[in-house]
Image (tube, helix red, strand yellow):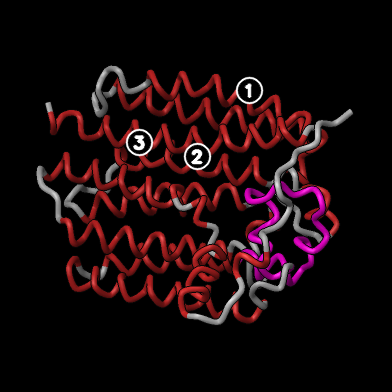
């Protein structure tokens, strides 16, 4: 008998009603799914830590601009993903979602915001990100444009247009780039670090941990996504292989940290936490094998994955700053 969860399946419409500016701002903020913002904030922190250690100083204005731009692109991606999923109908069909983690924000389906208003919100967020990018361009030069355009392109192509990376089973790989390689190496470069093989390797565990969030969040949505042609990796390979892939990703992230430590780029204790986090990853992979049949177990697996990303990124940030502090 599957366990049932008392968690709500949708946002409470009454909590977001009203015509005042503050209520409109509340709707806009929560439509971006802010619970997932650590997935973009922490990579910038990790990259900045690497850059500060290399340069021996921090440019606070550049850090804040990079953080603002990255979070805006992330928020826009979340909103536009809701728009894209509504266009193909997967969120409307999804009655196995685990709110607020899977199945989107539910704002369109609950009538809190229309599809067109969500599209305008996503566009506005990309404009805000572009304005921050222009300020960074003035500070650091044309290379900023490459980082910015790549991030915006991935945010849009993930859910919209003829490509729709998420529907091609390429969503996870794109997330490693969008939430690992780009923000980590970009933030480090903005602080004065060269973009070399060590930095790129350092960015990979960060991106992998975020990509694992996406992968596990797609598990409860398998039925609805498959029915609408959104062929994510879990839809394509099933629960058992998804669980194996999920655990392999975490092992790879820990292995990269071990390699960076052996090569002298991180302190000796750096692998300890990523290796310990494999215990949580193993338990979460067991939840994936059961899937939505056990909602509480699946929910705990998702929350464990969010915790792995938070703890792992904060730990790597501290490890990167270790040589600067001591």
Secondary element under disc 3, as helix, strand or loop, is: helix
Q: Which mark is residue 44?
A: none
| Residue bearing the label numbered 2 | 208
Quadrant containing the N terminus is top right
Q: Is residue 54 above or below residue 107?
A: above
| Side (left or right) of 225 relative to 104 | right
Q: Quadrant of residue 140?
A: bottom left
Residue at which label 3 appears = 314
Query: Is 84 on the left-hand or right-hand side of 240?
Result: left
Q: Quadrant of residue 248?
A: top right
Residue at the disc numbered 1:
283
Q: Which residue sits at x=25%, y=49%?
A: 188
Which of the two labelled residues, at mark 3 and mark 2, occupies the earlier sequence position?
2
Q: Is residue 34 left or right of residue 189?
A: right
Question: Badge 2, how many Cα within 10 Å: few under 14, some, many 20+?
Answer: many
104 lies above or below 326: below
């Amino acid at each position: 008998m599957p366990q049932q969860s008392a968690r709500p399946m949708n946002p409470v419409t009454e909590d977001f009603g009203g015509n005042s500016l503050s209520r409109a701002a509340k709707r806009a903020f929560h439509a971006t799914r802010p619970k997932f913002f650590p997935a973009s904030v922490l990579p910038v922190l990790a990259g900045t830590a690497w850059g500060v250690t290399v340069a021996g100083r921090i440019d606070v204005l550049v850090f804040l601009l990079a953080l603002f731009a990255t979070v805006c692109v992330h928020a826009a991606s979340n909103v536009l993903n809701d728009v894209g999923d509504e266009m193909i109908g997967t969120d409307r069909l999804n009655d196995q979602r685990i709110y607020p983690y899977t199945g989107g924000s539910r704002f369109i389906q609950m009538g809190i915001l229309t599809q067109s208003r969500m599209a305008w919100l996503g566009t506005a967020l990309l404009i805000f990100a572009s304005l921050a990018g222009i300020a960074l361009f003035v500070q650091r030069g044309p290379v900023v444009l490459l980082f910015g355009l790549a991030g915006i392109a991935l945010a849009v192509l993930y859910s919209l247009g003829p490509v729709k990376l998420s529907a091609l089973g390429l969503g996870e790989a794109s997330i490693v780039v969008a939430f690992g390689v780009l923000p980590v190496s970009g933030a480090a470069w903005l602080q004065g670090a060269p973009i070399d093989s060590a930095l790129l390797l350092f960015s990979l565990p960060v991106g992998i941990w975020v990509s694992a969030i996406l992968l596990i969040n797609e598990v409860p949505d398998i039925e609805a996504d498959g029915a609408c042609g959104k062929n994510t990796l879990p839809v394509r390979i099933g629960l058992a292989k998804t669980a194996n892939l999920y655990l392999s990703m975490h092992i790879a992230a820990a292995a990269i940290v071990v390699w960076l430590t052996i090569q002298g780029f991180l302190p000796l204790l750096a692998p300890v936490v990523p290796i310990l986090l494999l215990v949580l990853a193993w338990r979460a992979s067991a939840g994936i094998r059961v899937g939505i049949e056990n909602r509480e177990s699946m929910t705990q697996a998702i929350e464990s994955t969010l915790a792995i990303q938070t703890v792992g990124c904060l730990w790597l940030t501290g490890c990167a700053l270790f040589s600067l502090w001591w």
